[in-house]
Every structure is written in structure tokens, then in C-alpha cells.
Image (tube, grey):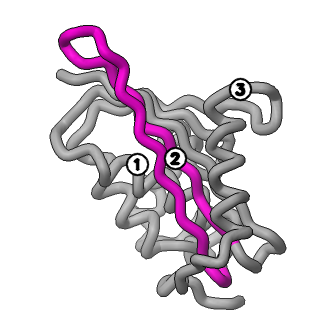
Amino acid sequence: MQHVELYSDGSSRGNPGPGGYGTILRYTDHAGDVHERELSQGFRETTNNRMELLGAIVGFEAIKRPCRIDFYSDSQYVVKAFTDDWISGWLRRGWKNANKQPVKNVDLWKRLISAVEPHDVTFHWVRGHAGHAENERCDALATAAADSDNLLVDEGYVAE
């Protein structure tokens, strides 16, 4: 099974406000050559959590066959949903959190769960803005995307 390192970060200028994600995919092929791909996009009106989720989604969706993936993010929101198994509780309660409130960003959570499913994933939380090279690069990609002129509409975003 191919091993892939996936790094992602999200950014929002205001919360809500313009936002973006940055994602890095890295793998070593059978000849020992390292391949790396960077993905990013900005959105006109969104939230930081939506961009954290979308950065992960885009990375997982870019991987076209089942792989062993080490996923790195500074978002405890994304990482703990898997490592602390929040998702099982949400599903059991009909997409309600432990306080019986609707889970936010269900559209993206469903998409992420589906994107993760074919893979063997280990989730890693990294401290943001602490010198982790790939996290810093993803942050730079995300903020540049949020600040760009090429901003899309986040179709799933609903102002609260």
C-alpha cells in the first residue's frame, strides 16, 4: 500500500470572512523519488473551521486509490473528530453534538468521512505557528488563497 503524507491548514480573515485552505501531498515512489503537490483555493465568505475541513477533504479526494496516509493538521476540530471518535457520537445522535445541538458543517463532515473511508489513516495534531515546516507552508498557501482575487463562493456556508 502506497504511503502518503498529507498536510493541511485553513484560514479565515475574520470568522466569518474571506478564507482559504492550503494542502500538501507527498509520497515517495518505488524508485525512491519524492513527489509533492500543493493545493489551495480561496472563498469569499466562510469560516476557519470550514477551511480546515476543506483543506483535508481536497487532499484526501486527490488520492485516487487506497493508501496508508499520515495526516497532519493544526486543527484539533478536525483531528479530534477522528482520534477521539466524535463522529460515532454524532452519527448515533443524528448529527447532534454531545449538547444535543446540531453539528456545524455537516456537509463537509459527510464529505470528509467519505474521502477518508478507503484509506488507512493516522491522524496527527501539530501545534500551529510553531515552526513545523509543512504546517507553515500550508498556512502560507491558505492565507494567500484567502487574500487572492480568485475567490469562490462556499456553497455550503450558511451565516449564523
92 or 107: which is nearer to us? 107
Picture layout, residue 120 above or below residue 38:
above
Circle 2 is placed at which residue position?
23
Circle 3 is placed at which residue position?
132
125 or 62: which is nearer to us? 62
13 or 66: which is nearer to us? 13
**Residue 38 pos. (x, y %):** 48, 45
First in sequence: mark 3 vs mark 1: 1
Circle 1 is placed at which residue position?
59
Quadrant containing the C terminus in the rendered view:
bottom right
| Quadrant in the picture for residue 94 | bottom left
Within-10-Å neighbours for mark 1: few <14, some 14–19, many 20+: many
Picture layout, residue 10 above or below residue 24:
below
**Residue 93 pos. (x, y %):** 45, 68
* Left or right, residue 30 beside residue 26: left
Quadrant containing the N terminus in the rendered view:
top left
Q: CA distance from mark 3 to mark 1?
A: 18 Å
Q: Residue at position x 28%, y 9% from top?
A: 32
Q: Residue furthest top?
A: 32
The span shown in magenta is 19-45
**Residue 46 pos. (x, y %):** 65, 77
**What's the magenta bit mostly, secondary-structure-wise?**
strand
| Quadrant in the picture for residue 105 | bottom right
Q: CA distance from mark 2 to mark 1?
A: 6 Å
Q: Residue at position x 58%, y 77% from top?
A: 150
* Left or right, residue 82 beside residue 114: right
